[in-house]
Amino acid sequence: MNYPEFFDKIPNIKLKDNLSSFLGAFEDGQIEFSYKDVIKSAGHSCPTVLGAYLMTYKALDELYKNEMPIRGEIKIEFSTKQTEGVTGVISNVMSNITGATFDTGFKGLAGNFDRRFLMFFEKDISSSVRYTRVDTQKSVDVFYDTSSIKMSEELQTLMQKAISKNANEQELKEFGKLWQNRVEEISNKVDEVISVVKI
């Protein structure tokens, strides 16, 4: 399986999943997600998928510091509707990593490990997304803004040709390469595009 090398340079997200430990899936419930794992689930790599991954990484790092984040005990809130813009794509990535869902997740066992009602939409927040630890109720607002990283004219031109199905095979390959170059550029400027604010 061939893919851009920068995928492997993006830090992995490590969590403890008590449900997976209880059911014997992973020893001690310790699991690890890579950006490549998320791409497989989402089906593509783009600024949106990358942003969802990196926002989660930065939020958990701030909320848990030197502790292991607990999967299934992290609440996520959005100000937008689930169907608005790319909110659905972002929420799917975050759900895969944290286990949080609104009402479609695992219902739990005898009141334990319930993954429902941990993700909410149309909430009164001003950030891109808010993460909250269920155990301590500590929260962080996360902001994601890539407006400072412009799309090149060449990429814009090739994108239009590709979308309109007027690009040849070579142009399609070049478009894909330039698209991932932009994603890589964003991944190299995490502190510029993402900010985390304690509540």
Image: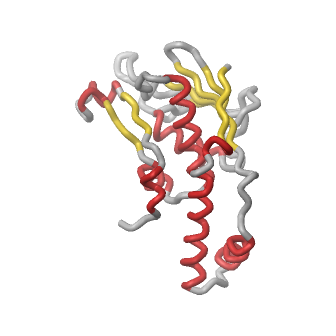
Which residue is more in the foreground, 177 or 21?
177
> What residue lies at 52% left-to-right and 30% top-to-bottom?
60
Badge count? 0
> What residue lies at 63% left-to-right and 41% top-to-bottom?
191
Q: Is residue 126 shown above or below 33?
A: above
Where residue 6 appears, as percent x and y from the top left, is: 48, 57
Please state, as top left, top right, bottom left or bottom right, where the N terminus lies in the image: bottom left
> What residue lies at 42% left-to-right and 46% top-to-bottom?
34
Residue 5 picture quarter = bottom left
> What residue lies at 58% left-to-right and 51% top-to-bottom?
188
Residue 56 picture quarter = top right
Q: Is 10 on the left-hand or right-hand side of 83?
A: left
Q: Is residue 174 shown above or below 90?
A: below
**Which residue is outermost to the top?**
136
Q: How is the image coloured?
A: secondary structure
Which residue is more in the foreground, 136 or 77?
136
Q: Is 170 on the left-hand or right-hand side of 20?
A: right
Which residue is more in the foreground, 149 or 13?
149
Where residue 97 appears, as percent x and y from the top left, is: 46, 38
Where residue 48 appears, as percent x and y from the top left, is: 62, 51
Please state, as top left, top right, bottom left or bottom right, where the C terminus lies in the image: top right
Which residue is more in the foreground, 77 or 6?
6
